[in-house]
Image: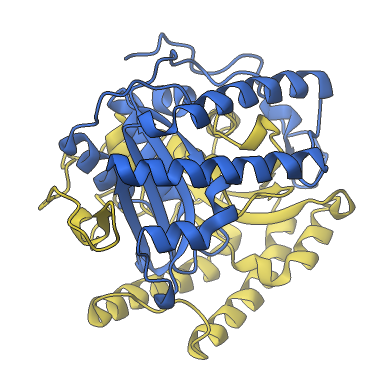
Chain colours: A blue, B yellow
Amino acid sequence: MDVHEALYTTRMMRRMHEDPIPLEAQARILDAAIRAPNGGNTQRWHFLAVDDPKTKAQLAEVYRLCRAREYADIAAGGLAKPAHDPVAHAETMRKIKDSGDYFTEHFTDIPLLLFVFAIDDHGGANIYPAIWSALLAARAEGIGGVITTVLRYEAEQVMELLEVPVEAGWNMTAMLALGYPRGRWGVAANRRPVQEVSSRNRWGQDFGVTVDEPLWNGVPEN
Amino acid sequence: MDVHEALYTTRMMRRMHEDPIPLEAQARILDAAIRAPNGGNTQRWHFLAVDDPKTKAQLAEVYRLCRAREYADIAAGGLAKPAHDPVAHAETMRKIKDSGDYFTEHFTDIPLLLFVFAIDDHGGANIYPAIWSALLAARAEGIGGVITTVLRYEAEQVMELLEVPVEAGWNMTAMLALGYPRGRWGVAANRRPVQEVSSRNRWGQDFGVTVDEPLWNGVPEN
């Protein structure tokens, strides 16, 4: 797959089939992920794959609890507000909530949960390139998923369940849910164009070039 | 370019030519970046391109100061230590320092500095996918670079210089330095293999598959 297709069409997929992900595909996903840059090449990362039904069921309970707490925070205004069109944002949030409800209800059907741990992730710089590489490599296999950090509300409980050696400094950065998607791949839409989110030399000065349409507009594979 | 080639060969490039990056290529890099996932699709990001010589010269002075502070922190043991082979790590650090010295001395020759700002980057989850997408899209153009966070030591000074509206909540996440590299592209080496950095169902349990060689081993383009 062309790199632009991967970059443009790897959207978050919360509805997926129960079919398992072959071990070889899992290996390809992680082998791509570990090529990502990380400060000083210390590679202080660890990837824990969960596919055991009993463990997934235990995590599903924790996930449900965490998600309720997240929504309480959103309702209290403690989380991100949109920087632009509030009507479009409300619609986006409704869609995300709907697919998030589906995701929560079908948590135990997700074929693979991939927990990502790091020691000193340096504000995300040392770990999110690897996480995003994993999702892009998954995309090339026709595998979709979502990055979620909501389990961090109960990180201690999750790490105890997974027997993470927290005394060594490991922290849970995120969980990826991976599976073959029910939805269709497509170019990430509803993006403010480049010229609205960029400047040149000083904040607010014209970037100097305008992009009217997504610069990749092929027909997505898989 | 195939997505795997991009994922496997986009290594950090600190030695680059002075040739400018065409505006159209800059637009392609940012148009790919803004497709990245971000929480609630709020897109609270801003990309500020710096190519003005006088501004670069001012930033070079700040960069030199920040790097000295970073090395003082490293010497004081305040920054990351390796989780594995200390000899290989020392060699890696020596190479990084050498190319970092070169980078510092040639800062004003870097054709494009791309500052990335975010409001509430959610531990990096909302901004590093876009940053990594920018570098992967650059790779497809034969453009290399490096992610650096070292200017955060003097974030206030940098943001004042660039006239960033900090009162609106904007923070500097990182700076990308971009240019046509002097070095050669190659598969990111010295990585611990998948089976050493992964587990299944419980920390320390066998991941279930072994990867002996990088799973992409083509000849890099550009």
Q: Quadrant of the C terminus of chain B?
A: top left
Residue B22, given in percent of the width and then of the height, sits at 56, 33
Residue drawn at 39 percent across, 22 percent down: A16
The residue at 46%/38% (across/down) is B138
Which quarter of the picture shows residue A170?
A: bottom left
Q: In terms of depth relative to the viewer, which is nearer, A92 or B17?
A: A92
- Which image quadrant is residue A82 in? top right
Task: Measuring from the top left, give residue B207's x and y in whole percent.
Answer: 20, 52
Quadrant containing the N terminus of chain B is top left
Query: In the rendered view, would you say B90 is above or below B160?
Result: below
Please identify the residue farthest to the top as the structure is shown: A219
Which of the pair A61/A192 is nearer the observer? A61
Can residue A192 be seen? no
Query: Can you say whether B201 is above or below A2 in the image?
Result: below
Residue A143 percent coordinates (x, y): 33, 26
User: Whole-percent x and y of residue A73?
Assistant: 75, 45
Relative side of B160 to A9, left or right:
right
Reply above or below: B53 against A27. Answer: below
Res. A75 in view: yes
Residues A96 and B67: in front is A96
Left or right for A160, reference A85: left
